[in-house]
Amino acid sequence: MKLSDVMQQTGAIVPETVASAEIGGISSDSRKVRPGDVFVCIRGTRKDGNEFAREAIARGAVAVVSDVQNGGGFITVPDARAAESAMWNNFTGDPTDGMKVIAVTGTNGKTTVSYMLREIFREAGYLTGSVTTVCSMIGDETVDTGGGSSVSDAAAAMTTPDPEVFYPLAARMKNAGVRVLIFEASSHALAQRKLDPVRPDAAVFTNLSEEHLDFHLTMENYFLAKASLADRSKKLIINGDDPYMIRLSGHPGSVVCRTSLPVFNERCDFRALRRKLLGVRGVEYLLYSGKDVFRVSVPIPGDYTIGNSLLASAAALSEGVSRKSVVSALCRFRGVPGRMYRATPEGCPFTVLIDYAHTPAALDSLLRTVRETVRPGARITVLFGCGGDRDRSKRKKMGAVASSLADFTVVTSDNPRSEDPDLIIKEIMGGVDREKPHAVIRDRKAAIEYCISEAIPGEVVILAGKGHEKYEITADGKRPFDEEKIVTESVMRRLK
């Protein structure tokens, strides 16, 4: 592809001397530049790509794209991150065009809603492609995205891959015959304009609670990052119970879903009526939309399952899927790996659940849900930590949530990255009620083994924070860490 074609929709003026040059690839990592590539200077949180432009040229880059006035043959663009997305979209042939595209965004529930949508559209006979925090899939095939980024381990890359991964992956899906693409849109990816070329047919907005404030600084900035997706989506499926998301109801094509009872004049396009929490058997409710009313059952416990399934149902129905497919898919839905995942075998006198909850709101919801499903008087132990180089404001809050809702709290480590794990734990402990039963065990493996060795019959032990992750990130790098394997080995030793 010619450079002039790659640079369409970037706002760049391409010099005639290089406009017709054939481009072999695009890179924002100077170490991976090959002869014939274009190098894009991305300013990150730790390094500025402009500092490596000369290295990229020395490696054979035919052009360097930057939003800094460098002169000397550099191609200047208004925004390098937006340009990189447009370039990859052009280079891969605008891959999302021609597929039905559904984006899911919000603080909590993105992955669950995405998985529900995947199952609903599969039930309706579509070949689906999905990009989620857990994994990316084409039909039943899991696709390795290498973490979603060649230059970052940020949660944004793991949730929404960088352009160098996302657009080639979408092209691969399209070539495989995928008709419906479902993906999670992180606030980082939206703020950094990684998804600018994508025009979703429907965008689902789950909720907004405190998270990523180290990046966004304020809740309003966080909301605006999420809301930017609305301006280029044909339909908006909105959680009308959320005070932030309901602000989007004025957009054309918005569909409002409520599980709460609307007050006079409140808009409600889809509603859950006669809601029933059936303990470990899941939830049940009547889905109401205009004159259409039908029963929905989901075998996943928790009040939030009602909200998540209502949003997924509304999105699918709005895109023409039959209610038969919706009902059939949801009644067989078995959840998401690492979300309320039972890690102990049948017959074990206690239960260990692995869950991805890593925000105050998610941990609160998880603990309340478990409390609703266990027998009265059953002990609940929660083990958790907080990630390093991430939002510090949530640490004390998570400590407070844990000690107020669990019977026993174990504070440990969770991807400390470059930070001192002891200092992270100290900040968490600032919110823990020290008069309530608790323990601090820095080594996460030892903490899990301790919880299992001390568990009593009927107890529920919750390992929160890592969920589907099979690794631990420390100052020394990433290493394998499989909580399910640790649980299995610990339980087997206990039951011998």
Image: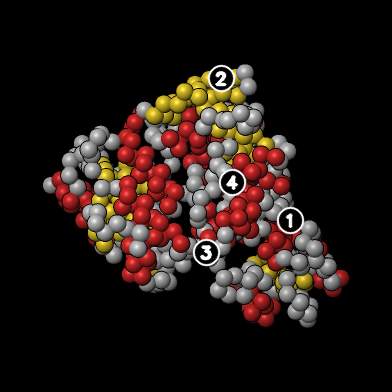
State the image coordinates of residue 447 (x, y, percent, origin top left): 25, 58
> Label 2 vs label 4: CA separation?
28 Å
Residue 16, visible in the rendered structure: yes
Secondary structure, mark 2, is strand
Amino acid type shown at disc 4? Tyr
- Which badge, 4 or 1, is on the more N-terminal residue? 1
Q: Which residue is mark 1?
A: 90
Q: Amino acid at mark 3?
A: Asp
Which of marks 3 and 1 precedes in the sequence? 1
Q: Eyeballing the image, is 227 above or below 423? A: above
Callout 4 environment at 10 Å: few (<14), some (14 to 19), or many (20+)?
Answer: many
Residue linked to disc 2: 293
* Residue drawn at x 78%, y 81% as measured from the top left: 72
State whether residue 101 appears in this view.
Answer: no
Give the residue at mark 4. Answer: 244
Give the distance between the C-alpha atoms of the residues marked 4 and 1, in whole angstroms.
34 Å
Q: Nearer the viewer, residue 309 or 77?
A: 309
Residue 370 in percent (x, y) is at 33, 40
Q: Marks 3 and 4, Cα distance to the nearest angstrom?
A: 19 Å
The amino acid pointed to by label 1 is Asn
**As rendered, which of 88 and 292 lies closer to the eye?**
292
